[in-house]
Image: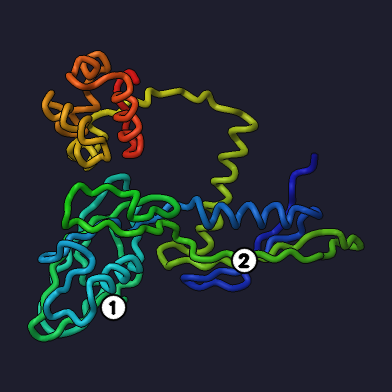
Amino acid sequence: MNEPMFEIKAEEKTQNYGKFVISPLVQGYGDTLGNSLRRVLLTSLPGAAITTVKIAGVRHQFSVVKGMKEDVVDLLLNLKKVRITYSGDKVVRASLNVKGAGEVKAKDIKVPAEVKIANPEFVLVTLNKSGSLSADIEIESGVGYMPARDRVTGEIDLIPLDASFSPVVRVNYKVEETRVGRLTNYDKLTLEIWTNGTISPKDTLAQGAMILVSYFSQIIAPKKVEKKAQEASTDDLGSVGKLSVEEIGLPTRVSNALIRAGYETVEVLVSAKKEELVNVRNLGEKSLKIISVALAEKGVKLQQL
């Protein structure tokens, strides 16, 4: 089979927008490439977002900050719109400390050296003369979209945010017929990409293509998949490990039995062996299944179950 030969031309490009024409393509490959690239660009590219915020004096999102024109809900919605460039694996912390009258902007967020804010002039809230705002912020890298309800904080005053990690905002593609010599049955693919400004459209196109190549490479030359044990490590539990057994949705009878036996937190519970739990008074095989289901909903697993 002949190697594909086509050109990629950037007809328009700005920091947030790119229009690319890919041609000539063998008939049918315009839709094949266009649809595949669109799906990957919208769902599979890594990015970063603010995932939690802890505001001084605020216990929940319906609280009020004295001296702030907007309410806390408005602040949280605006924090979700802050565009962040960060590619590390670990959660990083940032802070926001502003006093006095004026607009509070994204650039007022103090971030580590490895983090950059792509829209520094974006206005978060407005303070009056006596106003002040102090907040601790967590930033994570990820892929796709993660709703706040899927993030367990373990702290009452730590507010989780819906996080859209994808740097690509929108993708359009169009396929038209094009001519190669006397032949007219070739495709011309026009691809439009809008980003949030943390990455150029040209780079997103290259990343999307590389992701597709990696999947096809696994079909051509499959690498052996090593199966790893799914049992939870207490080092990887994070905030979930600090939850008490009363906070994971267990029946009162079961949680009370665990507490009396010394299994007060998830961290302690997942390190216990099946034979140890079976010997706990008022627990049996049925109770162990209930515990296993409750922990699975938090993303962890009991040993030997």
Residue 291 placement (x, y as % from top left): 29, 29
Q: Is residue 168 above or below residue 228?
A: below
Tell me where residue 240 sits by quadrant.
top left
Cβ atoms at labels 1 and 2 below 8 Å apart: no
Tell me where residue 118 sits by quadrant.
bottom left
Q: Residue at x 52, y 52 (%)?
A: 207
- Residue at the far right in the pictured view: 182
Residue 242 placement (x, y as % from top left): 17, 39
Q: Amino acid at mark 2?
A: Asn
Quarter of the figure with the N terminus: top right
- 231 vs 194, left or right, is left
Q: Residues within 10 Å of mark 1 (few under 14, many from 20)?
A: some
Which of pointers 1 and 2 lies earlier in the amino acid sequence? 1
- 60 vs 228, left or right, is left
Residue 46 placement (x, y as % from top left): 43, 52
Residue 165 placement (x, y as % from top left): 40, 56
Residue under numbered circle 1: 123
Q: Amino acid at mark 1?
A: Val
The disc at residue 231 is none
Quarter of the figure with the C terminus: top left
Residue under numbered circle 2: 172
Tell me where residue 108 sits by quadrant.
bottom left
How many marks on residues? 2
